Image: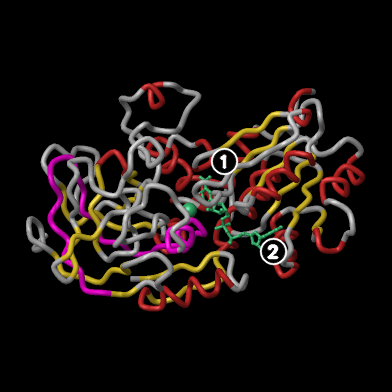
Amino acid sequence: MATSGKVIKCRAAVAWAVGKPLSVEEVEVAPPKAREVRIKMVATGICHTDEHVLKGCLPNVEFPVIPGHEGAGIVESIGEGVSSVKPGDKVIPLCVPQCGECSFCLNPESNFCQKSHICEPQNLLPDKTSRFTCKGKQIHHFLWVSTFAEYTVIPEYAVAKIDTAAPLDKVCLLGCGFSTGYGAAINTAKVKPGSTCAIFGLGGVGLSVVMGCKAAGASRIIAVDINKDKFAKAKELGATDCISPRDFNKPIQDVLIEMTGQGVDYSFEAIGLAETMIAALASCNMSTGIFVMIGVLNAGTEISIDPMLLLTGRTWKGTALGGWKMRDSIPKLVSSYLEKKFNSDLLITHTLPFAKVNEGFELLRAGKSIRSILLF
Ligand code: PAD
Ligand code: ZN
Protein backbone atom coordinates (compact mmCIF):
# COMPACT_ATOMS: atom_id res chain seq x y z
CA MET A 1 0.00 0.00 0.00
CA ALA A 2 1.06 3.58 -0.67
CA THR A 3 1.20 4.33 3.06
CA SER A 4 3.40 1.34 3.93
CA GLY A 5 6.58 2.34 5.79
CA LYS A 6 5.37 5.92 6.25
CA VAL A 7 3.99 7.81 9.22
CA ILE A 8 0.21 8.16 8.83
CA LYS A 9 -1.66 11.23 10.01
CA CYS A 10 -5.20 10.37 11.07
CA ARG A 11 -7.87 10.95 13.70
CA ALA A 12 -7.87 9.36 17.14
CA ALA A 13 -9.74 9.96 20.40
CA VAL A 14 -7.17 10.94 23.01
CA ALA A 15 -7.80 10.91 26.77
CA TRP A 16 -5.37 13.61 27.92
CA ALA A 17 -6.08 13.26 31.64
CA VAL A 18 -8.33 11.45 34.13
CA GLY A 19 -11.91 12.71 34.16
CA LYS A 20 -11.64 14.69 30.91
CA PRO A 21 -13.83 13.88 27.88
CA LEU A 22 -12.08 12.32 24.93
CA SER A 23 -10.69 14.75 22.43
CA VAL A 24 -10.68 13.82 18.74
CA GLU A 25 -7.26 14.90 17.48
CA GLU A 26 -4.97 14.49 14.52
CA VAL A 27 -2.30 11.98 15.55
CA GLU A 28 0.76 10.52 13.83
CA VAL A 29 0.94 6.75 13.70
CA ALA A 30 4.42 5.33 13.04
CA PRO A 31 4.89 2.27 10.82
CA PRO A 32 4.89 -1.14 12.50
CA LYS A 33 8.22 -2.46 13.77
CA ALA A 34 9.24 -6.14 13.68
CA ARG A 35 6.40 -8.54 14.62
CA GLU A 36 3.88 -5.66 14.62
CA VAL A 37 0.87 -4.97 12.44
CA ARG A 38 -0.64 -1.59 11.46
CA ILE A 39 -4.41 -1.78 11.13
CA LYS A 40 -6.93 0.59 9.56
CA MET A 41 -9.85 0.42 11.99
CA VAL A 42 -13.32 0.21 10.47
CA ALA A 43 -15.51 0.03 13.58
CA THR A 44 -15.16 0.04 17.35
CA GLY A 45 -17.62 -0.56 20.17
CA ILE A 46 -17.82 1.32 23.45
CA CYS A 47 -17.42 -1.02 26.44
CA HIS A 48 -17.73 -0.01 30.08
CA THR A 49 -14.05 -0.86 30.57
CA ASP A 50 -13.20 2.20 28.43
CA GLU A 51 -15.31 4.26 30.86
CA HIS A 52 -13.17 2.86 33.72
CA VAL A 53 -10.12 4.13 31.79
CA LEU A 54 -11.54 7.65 31.40
CA LYS A 55 -12.38 7.76 35.12
CA GLY A 56 -8.86 6.59 36.03
CA CYS A 57 -10.24 3.45 37.71
CA LEU A 58 -8.32 0.81 35.75
CA PRO A 59 -4.87 -0.12 37.08
CA ASN A 60 -1.74 0.16 34.92
CA VAL A 61 -3.09 2.79 32.49
CA GLU A 62 -0.96 5.82 31.68
CA PHE A 63 -2.17 9.15 30.31
CA PRO A 64 -2.36 10.58 27.71
CA VAL A 65 -3.80 7.45 26.19
CA ILE A 66 -5.87 6.32 23.21
CA PRO A 67 -8.45 3.93 24.70
CA GLY A 68 -10.78 1.49 22.89
CA HIS A 69 -10.41 -2.28 22.80
CA GLU A 70 -13.45 -3.69 20.98
CA GLY A 71 -12.82 -3.15 17.29
CA ALA A 72 -12.34 -4.60 13.86
CA GLY A 73 -10.33 -3.43 10.88
CA ILE A 74 -8.14 -4.22 7.90
CA VAL A 75 -4.38 -4.75 7.91
CA GLU A 76 -2.66 -1.75 6.26
CA SER A 77 0.96 -2.90 6.60
CA ILE A 78 3.07 -5.40 8.50
CA GLY A 79 6.47 -5.26 10.17
CA GLU A 80 9.37 -7.63 9.60
CA GLY A 81 8.76 -11.24 10.56
CA VAL A 82 4.96 -11.08 10.55
CA SER A 83 3.59 -14.26 8.98
CA SER A 84 0.00 -14.74 10.19
CA VAL A 85 -1.59 -11.73 8.44
CA LYS A 86 -0.96 -9.69 5.30
CA PRO A 87 -2.16 -6.27 4.08
CA GLY A 88 -5.85 -6.39 3.17
CA ASP A 89 -6.77 -9.09 5.72
CA LYS A 90 -9.75 -8.48 7.98
CA VAL A 91 -8.73 -8.67 11.65
CA ILE A 92 -9.93 -8.24 15.21
CA PRO A 93 -7.45 -6.77 17.73
CA LEU A 94 -7.17 -8.89 20.88
CA CYS A 95 -7.20 -7.17 24.24
CA VAL A 96 -6.02 -10.46 25.75
CA PRO A 97 -3.19 -11.59 23.49
CA GLN A 98 -2.03 -15.13 22.91
CA CYS A 99 1.75 -15.19 22.70
CA GLY A 100 1.70 -18.98 22.39
CA GLU A 101 4.86 -19.33 24.48
CA CYS A 102 4.10 -18.52 28.13
CA SER A 103 3.01 -21.23 30.57
CA PHE A 104 -0.61 -19.97 30.49
CA CYS A 105 -0.73 -20.07 26.68
CA LEU A 106 0.71 -23.60 26.77
CA ASN A 107 -1.92 -24.68 29.33
CA PRO A 108 -5.12 -25.74 27.55
CA GLU A 109 -7.14 -24.75 30.66
CA SER A 110 -6.03 -21.10 30.61
CA ASN A 111 -6.66 -18.16 28.30
CA PHE A 112 -4.79 -15.50 30.25
CA CYS A 113 -1.55 -14.85 28.38
CA GLN A 114 1.25 -13.56 30.62
CA LYS A 115 1.84 -10.75 28.13
CA SER A 116 -1.40 -9.19 29.42
CA HIS A 117 -2.24 -5.99 31.22
CA ILE A 118 -2.34 -7.43 34.73
CA CYS A 119 1.07 -9.15 34.37
CA GLU A 120 2.86 -6.32 32.56
CA PRO A 121 1.44 -2.89 31.65
CA GLN A 122 0.53 -2.60 27.97
CA ASN A 123 0.83 1.18 27.78
CA LEU A 124 3.74 0.90 25.37
CA LEU A 125 4.38 -1.74 22.74
CA PRO A 126 6.67 -4.65 23.77
CA ASP A 127 9.83 -2.69 22.79
CA LYS A 128 8.71 -0.05 25.37
CA THR A 129 8.03 2.68 22.81
CA SER A 130 4.79 4.18 21.46
CA ARG A 131 3.73 4.40 17.81
CA PHE A 132 1.41 7.36 18.57
CA THR A 133 2.29 11.05 18.81
CA CYS A 134 0.01 14.07 19.01
CA LYS A 135 1.05 17.73 19.18
CA GLY A 136 4.64 16.58 19.65
CA LYS A 137 3.79 14.41 22.68
CA GLN A 138 4.02 10.65 22.98
CA ILE A 139 0.58 9.08 23.49
CA HIS A 140 0.23 5.78 25.32
CA HIS A 141 -1.33 2.65 23.92
CA PHE A 142 -4.15 0.90 25.79
CA LEU A 143 -4.00 -2.90 26.18
CA TRP A 144 -1.81 -2.67 23.03
CA VAL A 145 -4.94 -2.33 20.91
CA SER A 146 -6.11 1.36 21.16
CA THR A 147 -9.04 0.93 18.80
CA PHE A 148 -10.21 4.57 19.13
CA ALA A 149 -7.80 5.48 16.32
CA GLU A 150 -8.22 5.32 12.56
CA TYR A 151 -4.89 3.49 12.43
CA THR A 152 -3.36 1.53 15.27
CA VAL A 153 -0.24 -0.62 15.67
CA ILE A 154 -0.48 -3.93 17.52
CA PRO A 155 1.90 -6.86 18.20
CA GLU A 156 1.16 -9.74 15.84
CA TYR A 157 0.22 -12.08 18.68
CA ALA A 158 -2.60 -9.69 19.69
CA VAL A 159 -4.27 -9.80 16.26
CA ALA A 160 -6.66 -12.46 14.91
CA LYS A 161 -7.32 -12.87 11.20
CA ILE A 162 -11.01 -13.42 10.49
CA ASP A 163 -13.22 -14.52 7.57
CA THR A 164 -13.27 -12.08 4.64
CA ALA A 165 -17.09 -12.25 4.61
CA ALA A 166 -17.39 -10.84 8.17
CA PRO A 167 -19.19 -7.46 8.50
CA LEU A 168 -16.67 -5.48 10.56
CA ASP A 169 -19.27 -3.05 11.89
CA LYS A 170 -20.96 -6.02 13.59
CA VAL A 171 -18.24 -8.51 14.53
CA CYS A 172 -16.23 -5.80 16.31
CA LEU A 173 -18.33 -6.77 19.37
CA LEU A 174 -16.60 -10.15 19.36
CA GLY A 175 -13.39 -8.33 20.34
CA CYS A 176 -14.71 -7.91 23.89
CA GLY A 177 -18.32 -7.59 25.08
CA PHE A 178 -20.02 -10.47 23.33
CA SER A 179 -17.16 -12.95 23.67
CA THR A 180 -16.69 -12.08 27.35
CA GLY A 181 -20.29 -12.62 28.40
CA TYR A 182 -21.00 -15.60 26.15
CA GLY A 183 -17.74 -17.30 27.15
CA ALA A 184 -18.31 -16.60 30.87
CA ALA A 185 -21.39 -18.85 30.64
CA ILE A 186 -20.01 -21.48 28.24
CA ASN A 187 -16.33 -21.70 29.20
CA THR A 188 -15.91 -20.31 32.71
CA ALA A 189 -19.11 -21.46 34.42
CA LYS A 190 -19.70 -24.37 32.00
CA VAL A 191 -23.46 -23.95 32.42
CA LYS A 192 -25.27 -27.30 32.16
CA PRO A 193 -28.58 -28.00 30.41
CA GLY A 194 -31.59 -27.63 32.71
CA SER A 195 -29.73 -25.44 35.22
CA THR A 196 -30.71 -22.12 36.81
CA CYS A 197 -28.71 -18.90 36.31
CA ALA A 198 -28.79 -15.34 37.61
CA ILE A 199 -27.10 -12.47 35.79
CA PHE A 200 -26.45 -9.20 37.59
CA GLY A 201 -26.08 -6.27 35.16
CA LEU A 202 -27.67 -6.21 31.71
CA GLY A 203 -25.22 -4.20 29.64
CA GLY A 204 -23.54 -5.60 26.53
CA VAL A 205 -21.59 -8.06 28.68
CA GLY A 206 -24.44 -9.24 30.95
CA LEU A 207 -26.83 -9.68 28.02
CA SER A 208 -24.18 -11.81 26.31
CA VAL A 209 -24.12 -13.97 29.45
CA VAL A 210 -27.90 -14.35 29.03
CA MET A 211 -27.28 -15.53 25.44
CA GLY A 212 -24.58 -17.96 26.61
CA CYS A 213 -26.81 -19.43 29.36
CA LYS A 214 -29.61 -19.90 26.84
CA ALA A 215 -27.27 -21.53 24.30
CA ALA A 216 -26.03 -23.88 27.06
CA GLY A 217 -29.62 -25.00 27.71
CA ALA A 218 -30.30 -23.35 31.08
CA SER A 219 -33.96 -23.75 32.02
CA ARG A 220 -34.25 -20.62 34.15
CA ILE A 221 -32.35 -17.41 33.46
CA ILE A 222 -33.00 -14.63 35.96
CA ALA A 223 -31.82 -11.20 34.86
CA VAL A 224 -31.12 -8.58 37.54
CA ASP A 225 -30.72 -4.84 36.90
CA ILE A 226 -31.83 -1.57 38.49
CA ASN A 227 -32.61 -0.18 35.02
CA LYS A 228 -35.87 -1.81 33.92
CA ASP A 229 -35.40 -0.45 30.40
CA LYS A 230 -32.98 -3.37 29.94
CA PHE A 231 -35.61 -6.02 30.65
CA ALA A 232 -37.25 -6.19 27.21
CA LYS A 233 -33.93 -6.98 25.51
CA ALA A 234 -33.02 -9.50 28.23
CA LYS A 235 -36.32 -11.35 27.62
CA GLU A 236 -35.76 -11.26 23.86
CA LEU A 237 -32.34 -12.87 24.37
CA GLY A 238 -33.57 -15.65 26.66
CA ALA A 239 -34.16 -14.36 30.22
CA THR A 240 -37.11 -16.12 31.84
CA ASP A 241 -37.45 -13.62 34.73
CA CYS A 242 -36.30 -10.00 35.12
CA ILE A 243 -36.09 -8.38 38.54
CA SER A 244 -34.91 -5.10 40.01
CA PRO A 245 -33.34 -5.11 43.49
CA ARG A 246 -35.15 -1.80 44.08
CA ASP A 247 -38.55 -3.54 44.01
CA PHE A 248 -37.84 -5.57 47.15
CA ASN A 249 -37.30 -4.57 50.74
CA LYS A 250 -34.95 -7.48 51.39
CA PRO A 251 -31.54 -8.39 49.93
CA ILE A 252 -31.75 -9.58 46.34
CA GLN A 253 -29.91 -12.81 47.24
CA ASP A 254 -32.82 -13.71 49.55
CA VAL A 255 -35.24 -13.06 46.69
CA LEU A 256 -33.24 -15.32 44.34
CA ILE A 257 -33.01 -18.08 46.95
CA GLU A 258 -36.78 -17.93 47.46
CA MET A 259 -37.38 -18.03 43.71
CA THR A 260 -35.19 -21.10 43.21
CA GLY A 261 -35.31 -23.08 46.49
CA GLN A 262 -31.61 -23.28 47.32
CA GLY A 263 -30.23 -20.54 45.10
CA VAL A 264 -29.23 -20.65 41.46
CA ASP A 265 -26.67 -23.08 40.03
CA TYR A 266 -24.66 -20.27 38.39
CA SER A 267 -24.51 -16.54 39.09
CA PHE A 268 -22.65 -13.84 37.18
CA GLU A 269 -21.78 -10.23 38.01
CA ALA A 270 -21.34 -7.96 34.99
CA ILE A 271 -21.47 -4.57 36.72
CA GLY A 272 -18.23 -4.04 38.63
CA LEU A 273 -19.40 -3.31 42.19
CA ALA A 274 -18.32 -5.05 45.41
CA GLU A 275 -21.85 -5.17 46.83
CA THR A 276 -23.37 -6.83 43.77
CA MET A 277 -20.51 -9.35 43.65
CA ILE A 278 -21.22 -10.35 47.24
CA ALA A 279 -24.96 -10.57 46.48
CA ALA A 280 -24.31 -12.67 43.36
CA LEU A 281 -22.02 -15.02 45.31
CA ALA A 282 -24.67 -15.45 48.01
CA SER A 283 -27.35 -16.07 45.36
CA CYS A 284 -25.88 -19.34 44.12
CA ASN A 285 -26.53 -22.52 46.05
CA MET A 286 -24.27 -23.20 48.99
CA SER A 287 -23.01 -26.57 47.83
CA THR A 288 -22.28 -26.62 44.11
CA GLY A 289 -23.09 -23.02 43.13
CA ILE A 290 -20.61 -21.25 40.88
CA PHE A 291 -20.29 -17.48 40.89
CA VAL A 292 -18.41 -15.89 37.98
CA MET A 293 -17.01 -12.39 38.48
CA ILE A 294 -16.87 -10.44 35.21
CA GLY A 295 -17.30 -6.79 36.23
CA VAL A 296 -14.09 -4.81 36.69
CA LEU A 297 -13.80 -3.17 40.11
CA ASN A 298 -12.25 0.26 40.61
CA ALA A 299 -8.49 -0.11 41.12
CA GLY A 300 -7.69 -0.72 44.77
CA THR A 301 -11.16 -1.99 45.76
CA GLU A 302 -11.11 -4.69 48.42
CA ILE A 303 -13.99 -7.03 49.15
CA SER A 304 -14.73 -8.63 52.47
CA ILE A 305 -17.03 -11.63 52.58
CA ASP A 306 -18.27 -14.07 55.17
CA PRO A 307 -15.98 -17.08 54.49
CA MET A 308 -18.87 -19.37 55.42
CA LEU A 309 -20.24 -18.53 51.97
CA LEU A 310 -17.44 -20.68 50.53
CA LEU A 311 -16.99 -23.36 53.20
CA THR A 312 -19.85 -25.56 52.09
CA GLY A 313 -18.69 -25.70 48.49
CA ARG A 314 -19.62 -22.56 46.57
CA THR A 315 -17.01 -21.48 44.03
CA TRP A 316 -15.96 -17.92 43.17
CA LYS A 317 -14.40 -17.72 39.71
CA GLY A 318 -13.17 -14.87 37.58
CA THR A 319 -13.06 -14.58 33.83
CA ALA A 320 -10.95 -12.58 31.42
CA LEU A 321 -12.60 -12.28 28.02
CA GLY A 322 -14.83 -15.25 28.73
CA GLY A 323 -12.03 -17.79 28.92
CA TRP A 324 -11.39 -17.89 25.16
CA LYS A 325 -7.84 -18.35 23.93
CA MET A 326 -8.33 -15.32 21.78
CA ARG A 327 -6.17 -15.92 18.72
CA ASP A 328 -7.50 -19.45 18.34
CA SER A 329 -11.11 -18.71 19.24
CA ILE A 330 -12.04 -15.34 17.76
CA PRO A 331 -11.85 -16.54 14.12
CA LYS A 332 -14.05 -19.51 15.09
CA LEU A 333 -16.55 -17.25 16.86
CA VAL A 334 -16.69 -15.06 13.73
CA SER A 335 -17.45 -18.20 11.66
CA SER A 336 -20.21 -19.14 14.13
CA TYR A 337 -21.60 -15.61 13.79
CA LEU A 338 -21.63 -15.98 9.99
CA GLU A 339 -23.38 -19.36 10.39
CA LYS A 340 -25.98 -17.53 12.53
CA LYS A 341 -25.30 -19.70 15.61
CA PHE A 342 -25.86 -16.55 17.71
CA ASN A 343 -27.06 -13.05 16.94
CA SER A 344 -24.77 -10.53 18.61
CA ASP A 345 -26.27 -7.80 16.38
CA LEU A 346 -29.15 -7.60 18.87
CA LEU A 347 -26.74 -5.91 21.31
CA ILE A 348 -26.13 -2.98 18.96
CA THR A 349 -28.50 -0.15 19.84
CA HIS A 350 -26.64 2.80 18.30
CA THR A 351 -24.27 3.37 15.39
CA LEU A 352 -22.46 6.71 15.38
CA PRO A 353 -19.73 8.37 13.34
CA PHE A 354 -16.37 8.22 15.14
CA ALA A 355 -16.44 12.00 15.79
CA LYS A 356 -19.40 11.43 18.13
CA VAL A 357 -17.40 9.22 20.50
CA ASN A 358 -18.29 11.35 23.55
CA GLU A 359 -21.98 11.09 22.67
CA GLY A 360 -21.53 7.31 22.70
CA PHE A 361 -20.16 7.48 26.26
CA GLU A 362 -23.06 9.74 27.32
CA LEU A 363 -25.53 7.12 26.05
CA LEU A 364 -23.70 4.42 28.06
CA ARG A 365 -23.68 6.55 31.23
CA ALA A 366 -27.37 7.37 30.87
CA GLY A 367 -28.23 3.66 30.50
CA LYS A 368 -29.74 4.35 27.07
CA SER A 369 -27.45 2.15 24.98
CA ILE A 370 -26.39 -1.46 25.12
CA ARG A 371 -23.58 -1.18 22.60
CA SER A 372 -22.81 1.89 20.50
CA ILE A 373 -20.66 1.21 17.47
CA LEU A 374 -18.43 3.99 16.16
CA LEU A 375 -17.70 3.96 12.44
CA PHE A 376 -14.50 5.50 11.06
P1 PAD B 1 -22.79 -1.47 31.01
O1 PAD B 1 -22.56 -0.18 31.67
O2 PAD B 1 -23.31 -1.49 29.62
O3 PAD B 1 -23.79 -2.39 31.89
C1 PAD B 1 -23.80 -2.39 33.29
C2 PAD B 1 -25.24 -2.69 33.74
O4 PAD B 1 -25.26 -2.79 35.19
C3 PAD B 1 -26.25 -1.58 33.39
O5 PAD B 1 -27.38 -2.13 32.75
C4 PAD B 1 -26.62 -0.99 34.75
O6 PAD B 1 -27.98 -0.51 34.81
C5 PAD B 1 -26.42 -2.17 35.67
N1 PAD B 1 -26.23 -1.80 37.08
C6 PAD B 1 -25.49 -0.77 37.58
N2 PAD B 1 -25.54 -0.78 38.92
C7 PAD B 1 -26.32 -1.83 39.28
C8 PAD B 1 -26.75 -2.37 40.54
N3 PAD B 1 -26.37 -1.81 41.69
N4 PAD B 1 -27.54 -3.47 40.54
C9 PAD B 1 -27.94 -4.04 39.37
N5 PAD B 1 -27.57 -3.57 38.15
C10 PAD B 1 -26.77 -2.48 38.12
O7 PAD B 1 -21.39 -2.26 31.10
P2 PAD B 1 -20.77 -3.44 30.19
O8 PAD B 1 -21.80 -4.49 29.98
O9 PAD B 1 -20.03 -2.86 29.04
O10 PAD B 1 -19.65 -3.98 31.21
C11 PAD B 1 -20.04 -4.55 32.45
C12 PAD B 1 -18.82 -4.79 33.34
O11 PAD B 1 -18.03 -5.83 32.77
C13 PAD B 1 -17.89 -3.59 33.49
O12 PAD B 1 -17.42 -3.53 34.82
C14 PAD B 1 -16.77 -3.91 32.54
O13 PAD B 1 -15.58 -3.23 32.88
C15 PAD B 1 -16.66 -5.41 32.74
C16 PAD B 1 -15.95 -6.16 31.65
N6 PAD B 1 -15.17 -7.21 32.01
C17 PAD B 1 -14.51 -7.95 31.08
C18 PAD B 1 -13.69 -9.12 31.52
O14 PAD B 1 -12.93 -9.67 30.71
N7 PAD B 1 -13.82 -9.55 32.76
C19 PAD B 1 -14.63 -7.66 29.72
C20 PAD B 1 -15.46 -6.59 29.35
C21 PAD B 1 -16.12 -5.84 30.31
ZN1 ZN C 1 -14.51 -4.49 26.98
Q: How crowded is mark 2: few (under 14 residues within 10 Å), some or many (20 or more)?
A: some
Q: How crowded is mark 1: few (under 14 residues within 10 Å), some or many (20 or more)?
A: many
Q: In which quarter of the image is the N terminus?
A: bottom left
User: Relative to 361, does residue 31 appear above or below in the rendering?
Assistant: above
Q: In this view, does 221 lie to the left or right of 17?
A: right
Report the span colored magenta.
25-54
Which residue is more in the foreground, 62 or 89? 62
Which residue is more in the foreground, 66 or 348? 66
Quadrant assignment, res 267: top right
Which residue is more in the foreground, 274 or 96? 274
Give the amino acid type for the residue marked by disc 2 in the picture. Lys
- The mark tally for this picture is 2
Residue 253 in the magenta stretch? The answer is no
Quadrant assignment, res 40: bottom left
Which residue is denoted by mark 1 in the rendering?
183
Mark 1 lies on a secondary structure that is helix
Mark nearer the N terminus (1 vs 2):
1
In x, y percent, where is residue 32?
15, 50
User: Relative to 105, does residue 216 appear above or below in the rendering?
Assistant: below
Q: In this view, does 190 lie to the left or right of 53?
A: right
Q: In which quarter of the image is the C terminus?
A: bottom left
Which residue is denoted by mark 2 in the rendering?
233
Residue 30 in the magenta stretch? The answer is yes
In x, y percent, where is residue 19?
43, 68
Quadrant assignment, res 278: top right
Give the amino acid type for the residue marked by disc 1 in the picture. Gly
In x, y percent, where is residue 290?
71, 33
Q: How far apart are marks 1 and 2 (CA)?
A: 19 Å
